[in-house]
Image (cartoon, rainbow, N blue to C red):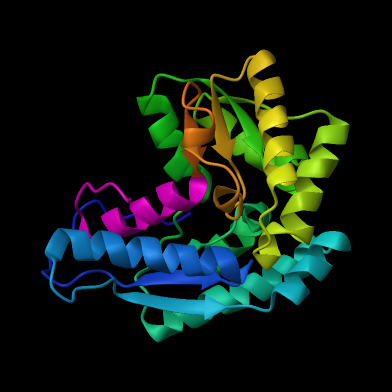
Amino acid sequence: MPESKDTNTSDEPRTIGILGGMSGKSTVEYYRLIDDAVNEIYGGHHAGDILIRSVNFADIEGFIQGEQWDEAGSYLADAAQDLEAGGADFVIMATNTMHKVAPAITDALSIPFVHIVDAAADVILDAGIDTVGVLGTSVTMEDPFYRARFAQRGIDIVVPDEEDREDVDRIVFEELTKGEIRDESRDRYLEVVDELVADGAEGIVLGCTEIEQLIDQSDRPEVPFFDTTALHAERAVDESLSVDIEVK
């Protein structure tokens, strides 16, 4: 995997390539977070230097449901190459689930790919936490790719039981990707959070880029929440500007 550059010797920001559309709701949030952070730093009419390649979420959902991971990897690698060809200096992918095929994307690029788990892991370790609960799609919660990436950083993950995983996944696909926010679903998610804490989680990873629409830190102030969307966007701005920032 190409290494991210540590310093920007030019006054010009590096162009952020966002591989998005998975879903469109989260891509919009990435765009807002990055633009707002850049504007907070520079003021005026400054905004992020961004390219977005938005894919058809229906295709992605089909790959997930059919477990067509090789096809998904090729599809997203082609889209990531569009970003590189368009002038992106590095790529982020605005989804947790499809990081399952991140190796196919990094192999197709000659520019850095900034992994969402790495962005979250740095903040989790800075908080002195080594065991976190994960909420996300079934793929993210069950597949080894997410657990293994955290394990490489010395972080253990706890996931909900099977019934809870089914509910968490269903709410993502049937509601959150469509922008539907329901009080009963918020209550259900918070029940799962409480169960994860009881099972030993010291913090909770919001491991789907739509979950921040439903629950946030104010719902359980005593348990640290790690919003992967915000942390990934923060890392992207840091990579672009080579400054330490906090995305609001």
Q: Main secondary structure of the magenta part?
A: helix
* Left or right of residue 27, residue 37 in this image: left
Please, is residue 199 above or below residue 60 in the view? above
Q: Can residue 111 be seen in the rendering of this structure?
A: no
Q: What residue do we see at 24% from left, 51% from top?
A: 6
Q: Nearer the viewer, residue 203 or 67?
A: 203
Where is residue 211 drawn, in percent x and y? 61, 49
Q: What residue do we see at 52% from left, 43% from top?
A: 117
Where is residue 148 drawn, in percent x and y? 63, 35
Please, is residue 161 above or below residue 108 in the view? above
- Could you say which quadrant of the image residue 10 lies in? bottom left
Q: Can residue 167 be seen in the rendering of this structure?
A: yes
Question: Does the stretch in magenta take in 245?
Answer: yes
Please, is residue 197 above or below residue 211 in the view? above
- Residue most extreme to the bottom: 86
* Left or right of residue 135, residue 108 in this image: left
User: What's the magenta region?
Assistant: 228-248
Where is residue 104 drawn, in percent x and y? 63, 62
Q: What residue do we see at 28% from left, 46% from top?
A: 246
The count of marks equals 0
Q: Nearer the viewer, residue 193 or 238?
A: 193
* Left or right of residue 75, residue 5 in this image: left
Q: Nearer the viewer, residue 226 or 129?
A: 226
Q: What residue do we see at 70% from left, 52% from top?
A: 182
- Could you say which quadrant of the image residue 179 lies in? bottom right
- Could you say which quadrant of the image residue 186 lies in? top right
Question: Does the stretch in magenta take in 88?
Answer: no
